[in-house]
Amino acid sequence: MDKAVTDTGVKLALEHVTSGYGAVAIIRDLTLDIRRGEIFALMGKNGMGKTTLLKTILGLIAMKDGTIRFDGAEITGAEPKALVEAGVAYAPQDQPLFQDLSIRDNLRLALPADRHLAAGLEHVCQHFPFLKDRLAQKAGTLSGGEQKMLIIARALMTGPNLLLIDEISEGLQPTVVARIAAALKAERSENGTTILLVEQNLDFALGIADRWALLKLGSIDDAGTVGAGTHQQVLSHLQI
């Protein structure tokens, strides 16, 4: 990662990014910026490239063209480990929990050293109090909603300054979605965490986001600041 340049107020900047699998381009000439301390909702139908974009940012999918900057430093082609060390965390759509390990051990795996465990547990248990009394319970015995909260908690263990979240609300009860929403808003307001939220649940995404963009066939189709009429604006695109 290159040395950071002058602070522009932008946490993550993607400039003319093209990426995909083999010869197939999924993300096409995409330019987007995420500002420091904001929650940004990226929406779109299935198959439009949302997950591919997150994996491109994380260096899990090779870029074909373009530039990605994080805190002003170019991270194009950076190894995922370097991004984690720089303060980037990821909560993926699929559930990558170790089902036979305890809640404590699943959370512990997010940390570089055990000396950070106590502080990390205290932090995430403030958002999800049920974890505190069930740290010895195997992750595989949790309900679907509890596992999703554990995924978010694990991503927050290191106190990241950029959090990427992929379709976390899929299939969840409204009460669980509300608890996750409250946790994300608290992270932003209390710690200044920047959040890029990939979502299809419009009520959830637009209920906590500052700005939004709609992805269609790998490119930004529309974007704006969340306000009155945004829900209908996004919905009209998704119905086309």
Image: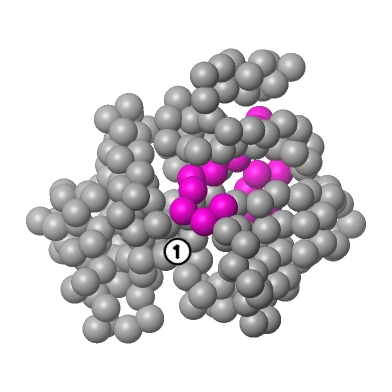
| Residue matched to label 1 | 161
In percent of the image, x 10 and y 56: which residue is there? 133
Q: Residue at x 82, y 62 (%)?
A: 66
Q: Report which quarter residue 232 is drawn in.
A: top right
Q: Is residue 45 part of the magenta span, yes or no?
A: yes
Estimate how packed mark 1 is, as few (under 14), some (14 to 19) or many (20 or more) residues with alpha carbons within 10 Å: many
Residue 96 lies in the magenta-colored region: no
Residue drawn 27% across and 82% down?
114
Where are the magenta residues, as a range?
35-54
Figure quadrant of the N terminus: bottom right
Residue 28 in sight from this viewpoint: yes
Which image quadrant for residue 104?
Answer: bottom left
**How are the colours assigned in the image?**
one colour
Q: Please provide percent x and percent y for residue 41.
A: 55, 39
Residue depicted at 56% across the width and 72% down the height = 83
Percent across and percent down for residue 163 are: 47, 57
* Quarter of the rendering containing residue 192: bottom left
21 or 19: nearer the viewer: 19
**Left or right of 4: which side holds 104?**
left
Q: Is residue 158 above or below residue 24?
A: below
177 over 142 or under it: above or below: above
Amino acid type of the residue tagged 1 in the rendering: Asn
Tell me if I can see residue 151 in this picture: no
Residue 137 point in image, percent of width and height: 18, 58
- Residue 210, above or below 55: above
